[in-house]
Image (cartoon, rainbow, N blue to C red):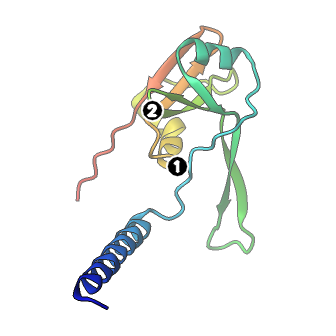
Amino acid sequence: MQKSDMIIVILLVTICVAWITLRMRSWLETPKGKLMIPISDEIPQDEAVELLEGAGFDVVAAKTRIPIMIELSDMDEPMQSRLFVDYFVKKEDQYYLVKLARDRKPIDWTGSALRDALLPYQLLYPEAAGILYVDMYQQKIKKIKFQIEVQL
């Protein structure tokens, strides 16, 4: 090998090692257990989808079930529960979770009630820009964003 060939080989090895190091660091720093926003081709056409699309949102996924396992210290068997997101939508490169208003479970529009009802969804999908609360009876879409300040 000539000296110029050796320099090119060293340069290529250095670039490969740097690339692998950056990829490994990125992989290690990615939070574990983070849910990814689903994308689906099967979107049922209903009134809610029409309202969201009329407001400029692209519906990317329909009803999604999020299973939850709960372990209690004095119980042998874990308990099961679930959360449901009605839709996932996208607008201007930002994703939103959609919850539909329900007659049997109305939302009290106070800070603590919104926190209790909707914050778990935002925490499950931190990459989402917010939550859209869709009231089909009033034909309204309310955008809710949570800002959490952590003080140490």
Left or right of 44: which side holds 18?
A: left
**Which class describes the residues within 10 Å of circle 2: few (<14), some (14-19), or many (20+)?**
few
Secondary structure beneath label 1: helix
Tell me what residue is drawn at x 33 percent, y 39 percent. Answer: 147
Q: Amino acid at mark 1?
A: Leu
Tell me what residue is drawn at x 24 percent, y 82 percent. Answer: 4
Residue marked by disc 1: 124
Q: In this view of the protein, which residue sits in the foreground, 139 or 129?
A: 129
Point out the image quarter for the N terminus.
bottom left
Question: Could you tell me residue 122's position as x and y percent?
Answer: 48, 42
Question: Does residue 113 appear anywhere in the picture?
Answer: no
Left or right of 87: which side holds 45?
A: right
Left or right of 136: which side holds 10?
A: left
* Residue 103 drawn above or below residue 116: above
Tell me what residue is drawn at x 60 percent, y 17 percent. Answer: 53
**Label 2 close to label 1 by CB (< 8 Å):** no
Question: Could you tell me residue 139's position as x and y percent?
Answer: 60, 9
First in sequence: mark 2 or mark 1?
2
Residue marked by disc 2: 93
C-alpha distance separating marks 2 and 1: 19 Å
Q: Quadrant of residue 73?
A: bottom right
* Residue 141 drawn above or below residue 146: above
Point out the image quarter for the C terminus.
bottom left
Question: Could you tell me residue 64's position as x and y percent?
Answer: 69, 41
Tell me what residue is drawn at x 37 percent, y 75 percent. Answer: 16
